[in-house]
Amino acid sequence: MKIGYLGPEGTFTHQAALKYTKRLENFELVAFPVITDVLQAVENGYVDQGVVPFENSIEGTVTFTIDSLIFDVDVVIEAEIINPIRHNLVAKKGTKAKDLVKILSHPQALAQCKKYLEAKFKNVEKIQFGSTAGAAKTISENMEAWGAICTADAAEAFGLEILEEDIQDENHNKTRFLVVSKKYNANPKYEGKTSIVFSTEDKPGELYKILDIISIWDLNMTKIESRPMKNELGKYVFYVDMESSNAADIRDAIKMIERKTAFFKYLGTYYTLK
Amino acid sequence: MKIGYLGPEGTFTHQAALKYTKRLENFELVAFPVITDVLQAVENGYVDQGVVPFENSIEGTVTFTIDSLIFDVDVVIEAEIINPIRHNLVAKKGTKAKDLVKILSHPQALAQCKKYLEAKFKNVEKIQFGSTAGAAKTISENMEAWGAICTADAAEAFGLEILEEDIQDENHNKTRFLVVSKKYNANPKYEGKTSIVFSTEDKPGELYKILDIISIWDLNMTKIESRPMKNELGKYVFYVDMESSNAADIRDAIKMIERKTAFFKYLGTYYTLK
């Protein structure tokens, strides 16, 4: 079994993939450089499953992931993984924090340590990088006193020293990852969290009508997000997560919503790994 | 009257600010480097009004703007400006498109021309820049064959040549800008579009209850967006735009929503400039 993830090794997505694959016996992890590559590899059958970041408690939904799921690929969600995000300031061994001239990391990691960086490294140049692990690799190969913000795993992988750990501004910083597989035709069991996307007809009150269906079937809507339709300002596709202990209620609500929406896509019903 | 905007000159926000100030007689435009600086200058009274990008028909809501309005600053929306976004590939005079080694622009501009860049400049390095106009300025000062994606105004301002115009992937590409001023105490007239943010109590069905109020008062909800509360994964603040021809209905709906929500902020009732 091949499992793709947003790489390289040492990223938060890699950590999530390792947590997910603990239960598996035979598997091979395959790193991809960007989120859409992971999702497309799943759709094309190059890998059996893919692990991608979906939502962070501070930054919000990862636009690339949600837009790909809505518009580009046909995959189903098999599981979600909720992981705490702990950032570390790292540098080559022997480097002192006060000597750093540049700090490299993924834009979200830089944003999540913004207050820390403002307080301690206000005048140090911040460089945006494609991944936290890529930033770690780059500074390990550079002669100057550069720092990176990354996981402890990445620091170890590239022989770097942790100058300060847990530098994230919020200690409630968590990220939700999704495990997706190729769209199956079997009937799902509708046990767990269910995700759907839809657009309504262009009349006032249409979104309210759909939320009414969710309310009538006693489903607990845990997330609603709007994404632009891309063809006109003010037109949206809605992403909804909902939960219920009654699988039949979810199944019937989905049928009703599908009939009452202009565009509908079922993204899956899945369990949570914390 | 001082009006701040997300600069430098030649940005899309500058274009929007010029459109807005056409009606004014005495004003001075002040450029700021980042969105939060514009909003804070309004709150501090350093400028009277500020113009910031809020939402693009392809990329969605500008996270910095919506999060600042929700969590950081107390300002009210005075007007919204809807402008078409037209991107141009530019370079120093005499440069040929095939010789370009780098293309610089704001991440959103690069994303909005993604298909064009993939088709014609697949192997040319793309560099993310703080603003489209800043990218234009940088390539005008560089000796190598670098390209930028920017407005026609920015190309003219920095003496650059337009190699190809209207390179955006979607021709429905529009951006919504907001004009904000310092929070006033006077009663608003409730004529036009109204924006509010709120969070509900942590019980199933609470968001539905608020949307029910909007439905009961016959308000047309034109946008709903969820943003993370930042302190816990799965907790959200909701941003809602709504319209009605009846000002009293809006006023009474707002009163009711304020009483029935855990956190509430009125962002203003305002007109649209197209």
Image (cartoon, coloured by chain):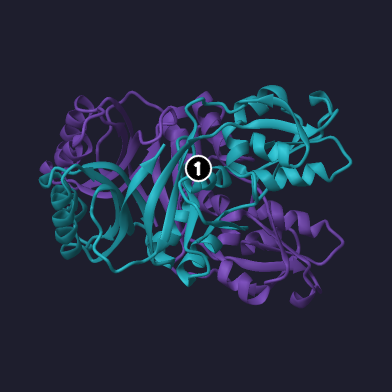
Chain colours: A cyan, B purple
Type of amino acid at the residue the image marks with label 1? Lys
Q: Residue at (83%, 25%) from the top-left corner? A: A96
Quadrant in which the C terminus of chain B appears: bottom left
Q: Nearer the viewer, residue B70 or A5?
A: A5
Q: Residues within 10 Å of mark 1 (few under 14, many from 20)?
A: some
Q: Is residue A242 left or right of residue A35?
A: left
Residue ranking furthest to the right:
A143
Residue ranking furthest to the front:
A25
In the rendered image, the vertical position of residue B231 relative to residue B223, given as above or below? above
In the rendered image, the vertical position of residue A25 relative to residue B238, given as above or below? below
Q: Looking at the picture, how far across and down is residue B27, in whole percent?
A: 55, 40
* Residue B2 visible from this viewpoint: no
Q: Residue at (52%, 26%) from the top-left corner? A: A170
Q: Is residue B159 left or right of residue A85?
A: right
Q: Quadrant of residue B267?
A: top left
In the rendered image, the vertical position of residue A210 relative to residue B87, given as above or below? above
Q: Residue at (21%, 53%) from the top-left corner? A: A207
Kindly identify which residue carries mark 1: A19
* Residue A270 visible from this viewpoint: yes
Q: Nearer the viewer, residue B166 or A212?
A: A212
Q: Is residue B52 left or right of residue B94?
A: left
Q: Looking at the picture, how far across and down is residue B131, in whole percent?
A: 64, 50
Kind of element beneath mark 1: helix
Q: Quadrant of residue A119?
A: top right
Q: Looking at the picture, how far across and down is residue A78, in whole percent?
A: 37, 54
Q: Residue at (70%, 30%) from the top-left corner? A: A89
Q: Chain of mark 1?
A: A
Q: Looking at the picture, how far across and down is residue B172, in whole percent?
A: 43, 67
**How many discs appear?**
1
